[in-house]
Image (spheres, grey):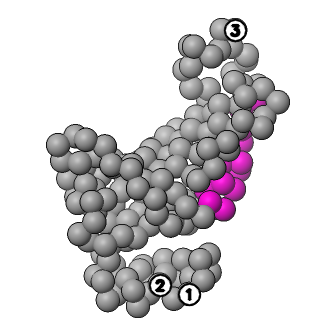
Amino acid sequence: MLNPKRSRPLWLDALQNPPDATTGLKPWSWALERLEQSHNYWIATSRPDGHPHLMLVWGLWWQDAFWFSTGPRTRKAKNIAADAHVVVGTEKADEAVILEGLAEEIKDRSIWKQVAAVYNSKYGGDVEPLLMASEGCIFRVQPQVAFAQDEHAENFNESVTRWRF
C-alpha cells in the first residue's frame, strides 16, 4: 500500500498567512476513497505536436495505481505512445483528486483478465470479450504526485493537499 508524503502545495495567491505544515490537510485515505468511487475520470494527454487532449474514461484505482482501457487507435493511446505523461482527475470537481503520473501499456493478457474482473465488479457486464475482440489497450498509471481540494472543508484554502510518491 502506498504511503505518499503529504504536504501543502505552493499557492501564493490564496495563502497570505499560511498555517502550519499540516493544518487542514487531507489524509491519503480521503483521496483513495474518491479515486476508488469515481465513476468517470478525466484523462489529459499531450498530442505529439504539444497540444492538450482531454477525454472521459471509465477506470479503476487498483493495486496502488490508476488503470483504464481504450482502443489502440484512439487519440489517448496515440498520445501516450508518444509521451507517457498523463493527468487523471476524478469526476467531482468539488472534491477533486488530480493525479499526475506515467502511463504504461500492459500487454500481459493474464493481467487483462484480472483488470476485466475488477471492471466487471465496478461497472457490471463483461468487459473481457470487448477488450480481446478490439485488441484494446490497458494502461496502468503510476502516480508521481497527486493533489486534492475539498470545497466542503471548513477552510477550503487549508484543505488543498499535495502527495508525493
Specify start and end residues of the magenta stretch as a single range. 24-38
Q: Identify the element where label 3 is drawn.
A: loop
Image mark count: 3
Q: Amino acid at mark 2?
A: Val
**Lower position in the chain sequence, tag 1 or tag 3:** 3
Residue drawn at x 73%, y 17% as measured from the top left: 20
Q: CA distance from mark 1 to mark 2?
A: 6 Å
* C-alpha span from label 1 to label 3: 51 Å
Q: Is residue 30 above or below residue 106?
A: above
Q: Which residue is pictured at 56% across the width and 82% down the height?
A: 120
Q: Is residue 46 left or right of residue 96?
A: left
Q: Position of residue 81 (x, y in %)?
A: 22, 58
**In the figure, 19 relative to 137: above or below?**
above
Q: Nearer the viewer, residue 54 or 67?
A: 54
Left or right, 94 with respect to 63, comes to right
Q: Which residue is the site of mark 3? A: 17
Q: Which mark is residue 127?
A: 2
Where residue 7 appears, x then y in whole percent? Answer: 62, 29
Q: Which residue is mark 1?
A: 125
Q: Quadrant for the N terminus, please.
A: bottom right
Q: What residue sits 23% from the left and 69% below the top?
A: 73
The verdict on residue 28 being magenta is: yes
Image vertical order of residue 6 relative to residue 16, above or below: below
- Say left or right for 110 vs 28: left
Residue type at the position of mark 1: Gly
Quadrant for residue 122, please give it. bottom right
